[in-house]
Amino acid sequence: MARKTVCLAFHEPKWLAELCLKLYKIESRLVRKLIRIILLSRPGADMYSLTLREIYDKYHQIKIGLYSYGLFYVELSPGTVVGRYTSVASGFVVIHGSHPIKRMSTHPFFFNPGFGFVNKLLIERRSKLIIGNDVYIGLNVTIMPSVIEIGDGAVLAAGSVVLKNVPPYAVVGGNPAKIIRYRFKPEIIHKLRESKWWEKNIDDLKEDENEFSGFLKDME
């Protein structure tokens, strides 16, 4: 029973969760930013906080799976979905749109209504990004607007500039990023994807000693 309560220790107290959810309804950038700072200041919040995940889903249309970390500090767009157990290092950047290069000027005065010179956004911006389960994104990785999906188990090497979708369990790197290799043989990749082990909570994985031990050594 003790194992089952390990992760619960990282969740917000009920009173704090309810207060933050209530205050977040206030449409103030300052208030919302303060709430995120308060929640993220709690140990383990990045990985475990259910309140943060509810806020992002309800108010920002961004879904971040349990145990995934490094994403609450990134500017993500509505329509982003991140699986569980995904690891993101610092310096991760998601580009949501590009300046037009076929027009007379590339300056935002001529496409961004925020500057007051045009009435609506005149470029396409990202509406969807899916980052799978158990993805590892290294230091200073940039994802360009042409990318829609990063597959389960993929690895994006440090410094990568990703222009294309990344297949499951592929290791990519470089600028532009290219497939270096796959983490495992096709039959092992198929077995891992079929198992969907990431749907289990960490306490449940830990409780089964035989299953948990499989995560602690290299796969053949």
Image: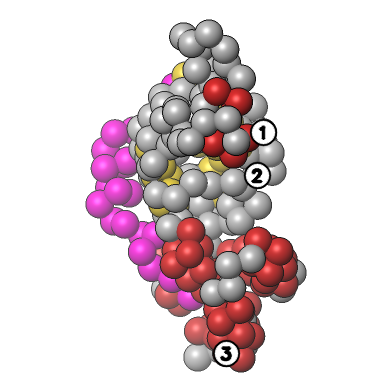
**Which label number is shown at residue 89?**
2
**Which label number is shown at residue 212?**
none
Name the magenta segment's main secondary structure.
helix
Asked if the residue under mark 3 is in contact with the one under mark 2, i.e. CB atoms within 8 Å, the reply is no
Q: CA distance from mark 2 to mark 1?
A: 7 Å
- Please name the amino acid that badge 3 sits on: Lys
Q: Residue at x 54, y 36 (%)?
A: 113
Front: mark 3 or 1: 3
Residue at disc 2, secondary structure = loop
Question: What residue would you read off at disc 3?
Answer: 14
Local crowd size for mark 1, using a 10 Å CA cut-off: few (<14), some (14–19), many (≥20): some
Asked if the residue under mark 1 is in contact with the one under mark 2, i.e. CB atoms within 8 Å, the reply is yes
Residue at disc 1, secondary structure = loop
- Please name the amino acid that badge 2 sits on: Ala
Q: CA distance from mark 2 to mark 3?
A: 30 Å
Residue at disc 3, secondary structure = helix
Front: mark 2 or 3: 3
Q: Which residues are magenta?
A: 179-203
